[in-house]
Image (cartoon, rainbow, N blue to C red):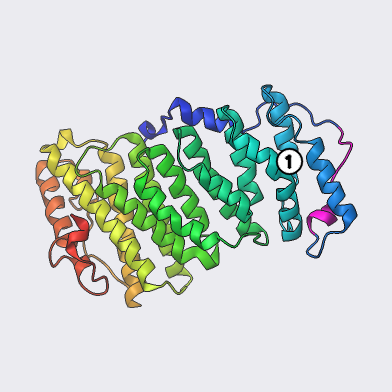
């Protein structure tokens, strides 16, 4: 991705720093511990196992609300360590989460932003219905808090992929990403939400819902931009959604996996909205030199076209091509050519895809043209 897209605001860096271990102190010998057999016990936990979990939680949560970052980090890492690996049982996860809930409630209610962020990290890794609700409760507020809440949703989804799910509200949580992505005004937070949606696509039972949530939510956010020139953060979010959808479509085609029609159409619609947006930006610029971030826009166009063609194949059951290279190449004019003539041709070509009677308005897509305005 273009090097200009590497800039990150201070609040975003603060959220990341709060969640990583830098020069963490050596872990002291634990007076209490939880055995692997307890963590992986799929049956009913014995009283002794429950007691060991409670003792471990009590021992390693004393400093989670401390103002000393090293003490906080030590306790946080000790708590998270027992959630590492695969085959963490539902019985253990639910008991562990219940014992941690009182301190997590205090952390998330704290006026200290760092405490809230650390609480969100732990709640996301626990991945139960109650801790998911805690994470969702922080999807509003300061940007750093919303950002970490978005990241923690991804933690929930990744935990479900590698372990037995201890959560019943997963479908609702994934579905809710559409509204969060569409409503989010901060591009960094929106990017984190999109990243979490891509993680949810790895959950087989939620893949269709995750695809549609990301595609619809991201399309709505692009529509809201009109023809305004994108900033770096907006481009990162758009590119993440576009490349992520392209990749999931490509895997479905390669593996000859079934893809529900609505999900394939949602991917195509998002891609058409992205193409329409780039066309508006090019038209508003008026001259090639004024087109902002052309290199990244070319990448966005390339991935969007690929997604449309892959979606067309998933919908029709046979190879599908737009018979055009919108981005262009050394031998064929397109957006990358950076001339007044090729920019004009690009705008016309996009209209042939998203305009009235455009390719996306006809079979196998049948998407109304007004969805691309």
Q: Quadrant of the C terminus?
A: bottom left
**In the foreground, 293 or 82:** 82
Type of secondary structure dominating the magenta stretch: loop
Q: Quadrant of residue 188?
A: top left
* Residue 316 percent across, percent down from the top left: 32, 76
Magenta residues?
29-40
Q: Quadrant of residue 235?
A: top left
Q: Can I make out residue 84 in this image?
A: no
**Is residue 83 found left or right of 10 in the rendered image?**
right
**Is residue 180 found left or right of 35 in the rendered image?**
left
Residue under the point 70% across and 29% down: 72
Q: Quadrant of the N terminus?
A: top left
Q: Is residue 32 a member of the stretch shown in magenta?
A: yes
Residue under the point 14% across and 46% down: 343
Question: SS at mark 1?
Answer: helix
Pointer 1: residues within 10 angstroms few (<14), some, or many (20+)? many
Q: Can I make out residue 183 in this image?
A: yes
Q: Which residue is mark 1?
A: 79
Residue under the point 54% across and 66% down: 204
Q: Is residue 38 a member of the stretch shown in magenta?
A: yes
């Amino acid at each position: 991705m273009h090097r200009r897209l590497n800039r990150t605001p201070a609040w975003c860096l603060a959220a990341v720093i709060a969640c990583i271990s830098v020069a963490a102190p050596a872990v002291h010998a634990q007076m209490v511990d939880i055995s692997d057999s307890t963590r992986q016990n799929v049956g009913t936990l014995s009283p002794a196992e429950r007691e060991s979990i409670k003792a471990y939680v009590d021992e390693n949560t004393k400093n989670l609300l401390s103002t000393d970052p090293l003490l906080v980090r030590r306790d946080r890492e000790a708590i998270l360590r027992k959630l590492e690996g695969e085959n963490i049982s539902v019985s253990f996860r639910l008991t562990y989460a219940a014992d941690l809930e009182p301190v997590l409630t205090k952390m998330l209610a704290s006026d200290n932003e760092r405490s809230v962020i650390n609480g969100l990290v732990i709640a996301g890794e626990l991945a139960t219905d109650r801790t998911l609700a805690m994470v969702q409760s922080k999807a509003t507020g300061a940007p750093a808090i919303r950002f970490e809440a978005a990241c923690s949703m991804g933690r929930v989804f990744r935990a479900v992929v590698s372990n037995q799910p201890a959560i019943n509200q997963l479908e609702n949580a994934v579905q809710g990403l559409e509204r969060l992505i569409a409503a989010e005004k901060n591009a960094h937070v929106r990017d984190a939400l999109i990243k979490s949606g891509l993680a949810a696509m790895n959950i087989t039972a939620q893949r269709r819902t995750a695809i549609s949530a990301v595609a619809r939510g991201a399309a709505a956010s692009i529509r809201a931009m009109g023809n305004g020139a994108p900033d770096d953060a907006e481009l990162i979010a758009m590119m993440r959604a576009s490349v992520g959808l392209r990749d999931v479509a490509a895997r479905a085609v390669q593996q000859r996996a079934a893809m529900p029609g609505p999900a394939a159409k949602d991917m195509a619609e998002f891609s058409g909205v992205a193409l329409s947006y780039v066309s508006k930006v090019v038209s508003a610029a008026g001259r090639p030199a004024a087109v902002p971030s052309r290199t990244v826009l070319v990448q966005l166009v390339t991935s969007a076209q690929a997604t449309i063609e892959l979606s067309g194949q998933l919908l029709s059951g046979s190879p599908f091509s737009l018979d055009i290279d919108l981005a262009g190449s050394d031998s064929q004019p397109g957006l990358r050519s950076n001339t007044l003539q090729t920019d004009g041709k690009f705008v016309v070509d996009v209209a042939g895809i998203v305009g009235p009677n455009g390719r996306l308005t006809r079979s196998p897509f049948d998407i109304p043209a007004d969805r691309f305005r």
